[in-house]
Amino acid sequence: MECKSAKIQISTSIMWIVLLPLYFSIISCDAESTSNRERNPDYVKPSINYKGQFRKGYVRKSVSINKNAIRNQTRSRYYYETRGKYRKRK
């Protein structure tokens, strides 16, 4: 009887050794996709360039990870270059 309980104890300890890392790896994975994450803009600190000139600090806008973002930017640029109040008259 003692041999059976020892086998059960060994099998449960092996099960814990296998399942516990699996459980933590599943929990540590981020279920939220990258497209749903909030992207915050970064502040770039003022600095001095290689010529010794002062460069002002500014807020760097966050970069869109939308696959259509570049296409939309191009369309928008084309629209405002060809129409609108500030276009160059020929």
Image: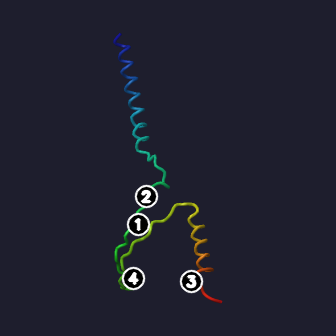
Sooner in the amino-acid sequence: mark 4 or mark 2: 2
Residue marked by disc 1: 41
Nearer-N-terminus badge (1/3)? 1
Residue occupying image coordinates x 41% and y 28%: 15
Q: Quadrant of residue 74?
A: bottom right
Residue 45 shown left or right of residue 84 in the figure: left
Helix, strand or loop at label 1? It is loop
Q: Is residue 45 left or right of residue 80?
A: left
Quadrant housing the C terminus: bottom right
The earlier-in-sequence mark between 3 and 4 is: 4
Element carrying mark 4: loop
Give the residue type at disc 2.
Glu
Residue at image mark 4: 50
Q: Name the residue under label 2.
A: 38
The residue located at (39%, 82%) in the rendering is 50
Front tag of 4 and 2:
2
Q: How far apart are marks 2 and 1 (CA)?
A: 10 Å
Which element carries disc 2, helix, strand or loop? loop
Amino acid tagged 4? Tyr
Residue 43 position in % (x across, y down): 37, 70
Disc 3 marks which residue?
Answer: 85
Badge nearest the viewer, 3 or 4: 3
Find residue 23 and report its horizontal and vertical position in percent. Answer: 41, 37
Q: In this view, does 46 lie to the left or right of 22?
A: left
SS at badge 3: loop
Q: What residue type is labelled 1?
A: Pro
Q: 83 and 57: which one is in front? A: 83
Report x, y in % for residue 87: 59, 84
Q: Nearer the viewer, mark 3 or mark 2?
A: 3
Locate residue 56, reporting x and y percent: 36, 80
Separation (CA) of disc 3 from disc 4? 39 Å
Three-letter amino acid code of the residue under disc 3: Lys
